[in-house]
Image: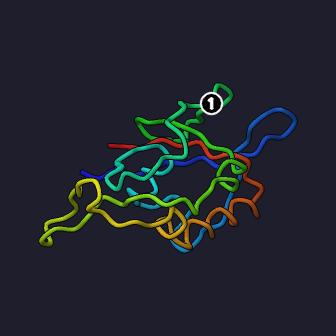
């Protein structure tokens, strides 16, 4: 069974947080695609590559209101500000330890057996395009969780 991310894009106006409509990017809504590498980076969820997470899950913000038509998943709830995402050092190297073996899916390589890369290369251009889409839409934070 797979795992998916569920996001709410928000902006603060006069001390209250509101959902912000955002345009679709290459893969649909920004950061709303099935990528265990992205999930590992955002919240250490399904982190098979051993990506250094930007932060451990923080839970839902105390000022977050879940509307009837809003679903933010079942576990590992968190939030990140756009400023945090923009200021992060994506050029730091890490060892991607998720490897493919014999066409039977991913496996975890031992320390030193993975591939050295940077977060920038690992996350790819679409991640940074998504950040710019959110900035352009006026998003100030993302609130998210995961299912399964």
Q: x, y percentage for residue 147?
A: 37, 43
Q: Name the residue under label 1.
A: 61
Q: x, y percentage for residue 39?
A: 44, 51
Residue drawn at (54%, 74%) of the image? 26
Q: Is residue 133 above or below residue 40?
A: below
Q: x, y percentage for residue 109?
A: 23, 58
Q: x, y percentage for residue 128?
A: 61, 67
Q: Observer-nearest residue: 133 or 127?
A: 127
Residue closest to the far right: 14
Residue drawn at (54%, 37%) of the image? 78
**At numbered mark 1, what does the secondary structure look like: helix, strand or loop?**
loop
Q: Is residue 16 above or below residue 103?
A: above
Residue drawn at (60%, 46%) of the image? 8
Q: Residues within 10 Å of mark 1 (few under 14, many from 20)?
A: few
Answer with left or right where residue 99 lies relative to residue 21: left
Q: Observer-nearest residue: 5 or 101?
A: 101
């Amino acid at each position: 069974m797979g795992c998916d991310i569920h996001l709410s894009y928000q902006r603060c106006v006069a001390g209250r947080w509101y959902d912000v409509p955002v345009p679709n990017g290459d893969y649909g809504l920004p950061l709303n695609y099935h990528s265990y590498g992205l999930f590992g980076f955002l919240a250490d969820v399904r982190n098979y590559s051993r990506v250094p997470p930007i932060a451990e899950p923080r839970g839902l913000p105390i000022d977050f209101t879940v509307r009837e038509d809003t679903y933010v998943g079942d576990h590992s709830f968190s939030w990140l500000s756009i400023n945090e995402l923009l200021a992060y050092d994506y050029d730091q190297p890490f060892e991607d330890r998720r490897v493919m073996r014999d066409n039977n899916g991913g496996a975890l390589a031992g320390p030193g057996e993975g591939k050295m890369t940077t977060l920038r290369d690992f996350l790819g251009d679409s991640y940074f395009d998504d950040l710019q889409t959110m900035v352009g839409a006026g998003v100030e934070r993302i609130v998210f969780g995961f299912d399964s």
